[in-house]
Image (spheres, rainbow, N blue to C red):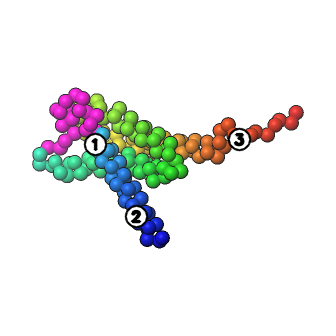
Amino acid sequence: MRITQSRSRERIEMKNITYTALLLLYMNLIPYACRLYRGMDWAAQYLPDEGHRFFGLLFFGGFASLPALPLIVTFWLRKHLPVTFIVSLIASTGLLVFWHHGYDLASDAQAAIGLVFIPVYTLLLTMLTASVAAVIELLSKKFRWGTHTMPEDKA
């Protein structure tokens, strides 16, 4: 009995780790994918030059992974807060697509600094969205809207 419970728990943990890795990959691919509608030249602006390709992608990927942090936390809490995960995933994806789809790196010499600030702003706004969604979801579970009876007014 203990062996099957242990194996089942290991499978669940392995699934969670796999889904976490997929979330990180998803968040790293959004900046490139949302730029493809304008062509490969537009998407290639986010790629570093040949000499710095590996470390440039590592640097960009490290910052691009920041918005995944609240998603990973809400994913691991999804049994208790399933709506919060979905709301924060939609918010994070929407913010990243909105900011990355038209961001022109060739417009200014300092435009590349935005590649650092976009994930940080998305992280903060996703954390705020996840917090508000979690509070609303917990309150709705606590009061079970429609089944909670209010005390009658004594007039």
**118 with respect to 38 (left or right):** right
Residue 90 disc label: none
Taking the view exactly as shown, the residue that stands out farthest to the left is 51
Range drawn in magenta? 31-49
Disc 3 from disc 1: Cα separation:
44 Å
What residue appears at the point 27 percent right and 48 percent down from the top-left corner? 61
Mark yes or no: residue 64 visible: no
Q: Quick one: SS at disc 2?
A: helix
**From the viewer's perspective, is residue 27 above or below residue 12?**
above
**16 with respect to 128 (left or right):** left
User: Which callout, 3 or 2, points at the residue further toward the start of the chain?
Assistant: 2
Give the residue pinned by disc 3. Answer: 148
Give the residue pinned by disc 2. Answer: 10
Residue 85: horizontal and vertical position, in percent?
46, 45
> Do labels 2 and 1 touch, CB within 8 Å?
no
User: Which callout, 3 or 1, points at the residue further toward the start of the chain?
Assistant: 1
Give the residue pinned by disc 1. Answer: 29
**From the viewer's perspective, is residue 130 above or below residue 18?**
above
Disc 2 from disc 1: Cα separation:
29 Å
